[in-house]
Image (tube, rainbow, N blue to C red):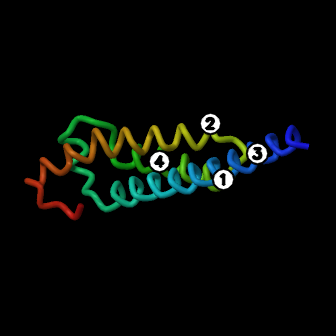
């Protein structure tokens, strides 16, 4: 009887972790998309990075796929998180430096 309890417990824990990862990834992608949409397009050109529209499209498509696919295919979710984190950790600090740290975020 104890051998049948372990797989059930494992599946429950995995499902909770998958759901938690999905919600966190949705939050990260949503924050990155909102930040991208609230910035001026000229700042992206000054940084020499992708244009604002390209970043918004990349993050927006990843967010939409994450919502549509849900918990079914987590590789899509991880790609979206990677794109959002690249934006937040690379482009966002550059935009903040351009505005002397007095930006909206």
Q: Residue at x 42, y 55 (%)?
A: 33
Q: For the residues marked 2 and 4, what is the alpha-carbon distance in whole angstroms?
A: 15 Å
Pick the residue in front: 54 or 87: 87
**Between marks 1 and 4 in the image, the one whose residue lies nearer the viewer:** 1
For the N terminus, the image quarter is top right
Does label 3 or label 1 sit earlier along the sequence? 3
The percent position of residue 47, horizontal first and vertical second, equals: 20, 39
Q: Residue 30: which numbered mark, if any?
A: none
Identify the element where label 1 is drawn. helix
Does label 3 or label 2 sit earlier along the sequence? 3
Q: For the residues marked 1 and 4, what is the alpha-carbon distance in whole angstroms?
A: 25 Å
Tell me whether the residue at label 4 lies in contact with that at label 3, contact meaning CB atoms closer than 8 angstroms. no
Residue 73 appears in which quarter of the rendering?
top right
For label 1, the residue is: 16
Identify the element where label 3 is drawn. helix
Q: For the residues marked 3 and 2, what is the alpha-carbon distance in whole angstroms?
A: 19 Å
Q: Residue 75: which numbered mark, if any?
A: 2
Q: Is residue 65 left or right of residue 60?
A: right
Crowd rating for badge 4 (residues with CA inside 10 Å; few <14, some 14–19, many 20+) = many
For label 4, the residue is: 59
Crowd rating for badge 1 (residues with CA inside 10 Å; few <14, some 14–19, many 20+) = few
Tell me whether the residue at label 3 lies in contact with that at label 1, contact meaning CB atoms closer than 8 angstroms. no
Q: For the residues marked 3 and 1, what is the alpha-carbon distance in whole angstroms?
A: 9 Å
Residue 105 appears in which quarter of the rendering?
bottom left
Q: Confirm whether residue 102 shows in the render.
A: yes
Does label 2 or label 4 sit earlier along the sequence? 4
Q: Residue 11: which numbered mark, if any?
A: 3
Q: For the residues marked 1 and 2, what is the alpha-carbon distance in whole angstroms?
A: 17 Å
Say above or below: 90 vs 39: above
Tell me whether the residue at label 1 lies in contact with that at label 4, contact meaning CB atoms closer than 8 angstroms. no
**Between marks 1 and 2 in the image, the one whose residue lies nearer the viewer:** 1
């Amino acid at each position: 009887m104890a051998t049948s309890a372990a797989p059930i417990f494992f599946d429950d824990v995995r499902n909770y972790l998958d759901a938690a990862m999905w919600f966190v990834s949705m939050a990260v992608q949503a924050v990155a998309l909102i930040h991208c949409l609230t910035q001026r397009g000229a700042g992206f050109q000054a940084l020499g990075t992708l244009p604002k529209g390209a970043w918004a499209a990349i993050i927006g498509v990843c967010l939409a796929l994450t919502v549509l696919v849900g918990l079914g295919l987590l590789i899509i979710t991880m790609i979206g998180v990677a794109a959002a984190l690249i934006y937040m950790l690379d482009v966002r600090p550059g935009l903040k430096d351009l505005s002397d740290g007095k930006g909206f975020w």
